[in-house]
């Protein structure tokens, strides 16, 4: 079963509007972290926002906020006031594993959503 | 510190040749990860180092792949006898204790012709 599901291969949004990118996850761990990354056409993965499974408040970073609904296992990214420079691929990722010296705690990524901001 | 550096940025090679990529992590990060990203997909975990020890390898890492991290600093990923299916972006990431701060490099894009 897929651990991270992003059901929107592509999304369009008008400049200055808000957009929500969907992400659902599957884990049996109690402790986990959820990440969103932006990947422009140049290829680098740019960290946007992080939500820990025990965090009670939804994470916010500038124009980015994470709508975390633990019972539904969803972690949607909300981008407010979209800008042309927001056009990129967006990935949701999850980190599982206990914090022990040998545990890899690698990130598992979804398949991404291509966001296009229209002028 | 300028972040995670990867070299080269692009590599075109003929099928059957060997290639080696290098990753220089953030200096104080003890954990280093290699991922592979094929077109239209998210990155997939290949292997992980804690300091100089390679502690985990994915099933994706066939016998033709080998990674090293001598002295716990930079890392190399070698692919022997490349195949067209190896064409992908190879991303390196580093972190301190695998917590919050995973930093990715810009990747090496490999094309096997």
Image: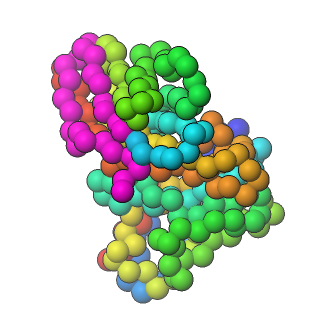
Task: Residue B42 in the image: state x and y as whole percent.
Answer: 38, 51
Up the image or down, B13 lies above or below B104; here it is below
Given residues A4 and A65, the one toward you in this image is A4
The residue at the point 19 percent across, 29 percent down is A12
Given residues B4 and A107, the one toward you in this image is A107
Report if residue A12 lies within the magenta region.
yes
On the question of residue A13 being in view, the answer is: yes
Given residues B113 and B71, the one toward you in this image is B71
Instruction: Point out the stretch of residues depicted in magenta.
Output: A1-24
Is B2 on the left or on the right of A35, as rendered?
right
Is A64 on the left or on the right of A55, as rendered?
left
> How many marks on residues?
0
Task: Residue A68 in the image: state x and y as whole percent.
Answer: 43, 25
Q: Quadrant of the C terminus of chain B?
A: bottom left
The residue at the point 70 percent across, 38 percent down is B1
Up the image or down, A61 lies above or below B99; here it is above
Task: Residue A41 in the image: state x and y as whole percent.
Answer: 34, 43
On the question of residue A38 being in view, the answer is: no
Given residues A70 and B33, the one toward you in this image is A70
The residue at the point 46 percent across, 85 percent down is B81
Up the image or down, B60 lies above or below B104; here it is below
The residue at the point 36 percent across, 56 percent down is A1
Report if residue A11 lies within the magenta region.
yes
């Amino acid at each position: 079963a897929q651990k991270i599901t992003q059901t929107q291969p592509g999304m369009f949004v008008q400049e200055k509007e808000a957009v929500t990118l969907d992400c659902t996850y599957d884990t049996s761990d109690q402790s986990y972290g959820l990440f969103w990354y932006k990947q422009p056409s140049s290829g680098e993965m740019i960290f946007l926002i992080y939500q820990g499974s025990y965090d009670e408040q939804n994470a916010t970073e500038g124009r980015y906020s994470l709508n975390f609904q633990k019972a539904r296992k969803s972690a949607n990214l909300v981008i407010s006031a979209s800008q042309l420079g927001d056009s990129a691929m967006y990935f949701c990722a999850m980190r599982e594993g206990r914090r022990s010296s040998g545990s890899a705690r690698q990130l598992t990524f979804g398949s991404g959503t291509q966001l296009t901001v229209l002028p | 510190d300028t972040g995670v550096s990867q070299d080269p940025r692009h590599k075109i090679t003929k099928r059957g040749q060997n290639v080696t990529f290098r990753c220089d992590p953030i200096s104080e990060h003890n954990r280093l990860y290699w991922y592979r990203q094929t077109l239209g997909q998210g990155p997939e975990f290949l292997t992980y180092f804690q300091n100089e020890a390679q502690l985990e390898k994915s099933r994706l890492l066939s016998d033709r792949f080998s990674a090293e991290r001598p002295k716990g600093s930079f890392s190399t990923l070698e692919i022997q006898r490349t195949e067209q299916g190896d064409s992908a972006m190879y991303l390196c990431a580093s972190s301190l204790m695998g917590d919050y701060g995973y930093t990715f490099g810009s990747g090496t894009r490999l094309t096997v012709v």
